[in-house]
Image (cartoon, rainbow, N blue to C red):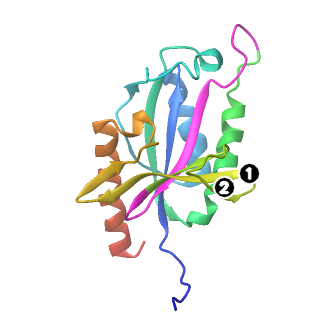
Amino acid sequence: MGIPTEPKPVKLFVALLAASEDLFAPVEARLVDLLGALETASVVSAWEITDYYAREMGTGLRRKFVSFAPLASAEKLPEIKLAAQSIEAEYRSASGERRGRRVNADPGYLDIGKVVLASTKNAPHRLYLRDGIYGEITLLYHNGGFHPLDYTYADYRWPHTLAFFAELRALYLKQLKRGL
């Protein structure tokens, strides 16, 4: 019989998507208010995977991942997702051709063996957490690196995204070792 134990804290990150890179800095500042000091960021990449966001956000979208220094409890992921949606709402366009989000901020976390994303959408591979939020394991760590699953989004398969998460995992392991 197993004995329930509290899990180790996790490393938080947010995947940002916007038509204008100018939106990244103010959104990151709001995320710092929510999650603590920024720790690292990925390169900014062109996001031309699908036209899923084109009607709402336009074309020429840019992707960036940012992580935060403080470790947190994994159980906070639903409240972080809801807070990120509030930040997105602050940057909605209320006029012009497009009326909707100008930035997408999708939080998740990394632990020793996986990358987990928060979602408001149910799917067979997602588990309900609470408050209308689901969790999705999108990358698994084994054989010395992160590996995608069948349903992993294309931008989480990019070599530089996998490198970002490998770097983030190394930072996380150092924090755990120091007891932070």
Q: Tag on residue 98? A: none
Q: Residue at x 51, y 88 (%)?
A: 2
The answer to which of marks 1 and 2 sits earlier in the sequence is 2
Query: What is the total number of numbered labels drawn onto the structure image?
Result: 2
Residue 29 horizontal/vertical position (percent): 56, 40
With respect to residue 6, does 30 lie above or below? Answer: above
Q: Residues within 10 Å of mark 1 (few under 14, many from 20)?
A: few
Residue 52 lies left or right of residue 64; in this view the side is: right
Does residue 110 belong to the magenta stretch? yes
In this rendered view, identify the residue nearer to me: 59 or 94: 59
Please say if the residues under marks 1 and 2 sit with CB atoms less than 8 Å apart: yes
Label 2, on which residue? 78
Q: Mark 1, mark 2: which one is toward the viewer?
A: 1
Q: Residues within 10 Å of mark 2 (few under 14, many from 20)?
A: many
- The amino acid on which the numbered mark 1 sits, given as a three-letter code, is Gly
The residues bearing labels 1 and 2 have C-alpha atoms spaced at a distance of 8 Å
Q: Give the secondary structure at mark 2.
A: helix
Residue 90 horizontal/vertical position (percent): 71, 32
Q: Residue at x 64, y 15 (%)?
A: 55
Provide the residue span drawn in magenta: 95-114
Q: Residue furthest top?
A: 97
Label 1, on which residue? 132
Does residue 87 belong to the magenta stretch? no
- The amino acid on which the numbered mark 2 sits, given as a three-letter code, is Pro
In this rendered view, identify the residue nearer to me: 1 or 13: 1
Residue 9 horizontal/vertical position (percent): 49, 69
- Quadrant in the picture for the C terminus: bottom left
Q: Give the secondary structure at mark 1.
A: loop
Residue 164 horizontal/vertical position (percent): 33, 45
